[in-house]
Amino acid sequence: NAGVTQTPKFQVLKTGQSMTLQCAQDMNHNSMYWYRQDPGMGLRLIYYSASEGTTDKGEVPNGYNVSRLNKREFSLRLESAAPSQTSVYFCASSVGGEVSGNTIYFGEGSWLTVV
Amino acid sequence: AQSVTQPDIHITVSEGASLELRCNYSYGATPYLFWYVQSPGQGLQLLLKYFSGDTLVQGIKGFEAEFKRSQSSFNLRKPSVHWSDAAEYFCAVVSYSSASKIIFGSGTRLSIRP
């Protein structure tokens, strides 16, 4: 029961370095998401992909890029990491679309520290 | 823009006591509403969801929530909490601008007093 798998689980970056967070889901879901979670801020949507081949900005997209590589995979890239991007990142997926029962399934999170 | 507000940042209740976590939303139409729970170091797990029909929704782990359109609320309740219920709870709503865009509240951390 893999569900949503994201890697790496922990990463320390220096300011200005780049990195990519990988995410894959095996539930044949159409929609995928990247959220960041910060104390007192809840989960904020960075980018989402409603379906394969589409991506859209969420609430806090600045400093990030995404790629929906195929239906299974949705990566998040930090081109030039900044300390403000220190956070816990969650990938998620859902059936998506105009469908009731649009439950989101989350990965276990990636802890990123930028020093 | 639609939004979700959880006014209580942290709540402490005694084990065995009843619980109510508040959630208010702003939305232009009938919303799709969710409650998720996050245990420390884990991802989020769905507790329950509301789309239409009966305004009292039953979820897992003995939780329920009631949708009140007149109050724009979707409060989560449990009649008797257990120590294992200590976690962070998030209310969420589906965006009307995109059925695939789900917006979360800032969360309520629940502590259980022995």
Image (spheres, coloured by chain):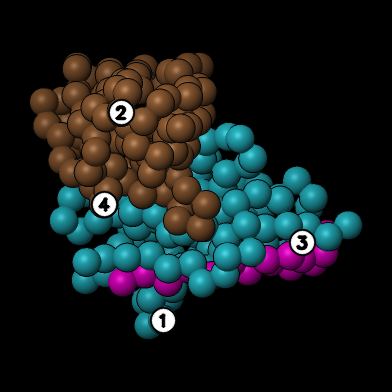
Chain colours: A brown, B cyan
Q: Is residue A64 visible?
A: yes
Q: Nearer the viewer, mark 2 or mark 3?
A: 2
Is residue B17 one of those drawn in magenta? yes
Residue at figure coordinates x 57%, y 44% from the top left:
B38
Residue at figure coordinates x 24%, y 35% from the top left:
A64
Which of B30 and A68 lies nearest the eye of the viewer? A68
Disc number for residue A16: 2
Q: Are marks 2 and 3 in contact (CB under 8 Å)?
A: no
Q: Nearer the viewer, mark 2 or mark 4?
A: 2
Name the quadrant of the C terminus of chain B.
bottom right
Q: Which residue is mark 3?
A: B80
Q: Which chain letter matches label 1?
A: B
Mark 2 closeness class: few <14, some 14–19, many ≥20 residues within 10 Å: some
Tell whether B79 sits left or right of A83.
right
Task: Specify whether disc 3 shares its chain with disc 1.
Answer: yes
Looking at the picture, how far across and down is residue B65, in whole percent? 53, 63
Disc number for residue B71: 1
Mark 4 closeness class: few <14, some 14–19, many ≥20 residues within 10 Å: few
Q: Which chain letter matches label 2?
A: A
Q: Which residue is mark 4?
A: A59
Q: What residue range appears in magenta?
A: B11-26
Which sits earlier in the primary sequence, circle 3 or circle 1? 1
Mark 3 closeness class: few <14, some 14–19, many ≥20 residues within 10 Å: some
Q: CA distance from mark 2 to mark 4?
A: 23 Å
Amino acid bearing label 1 = Gln
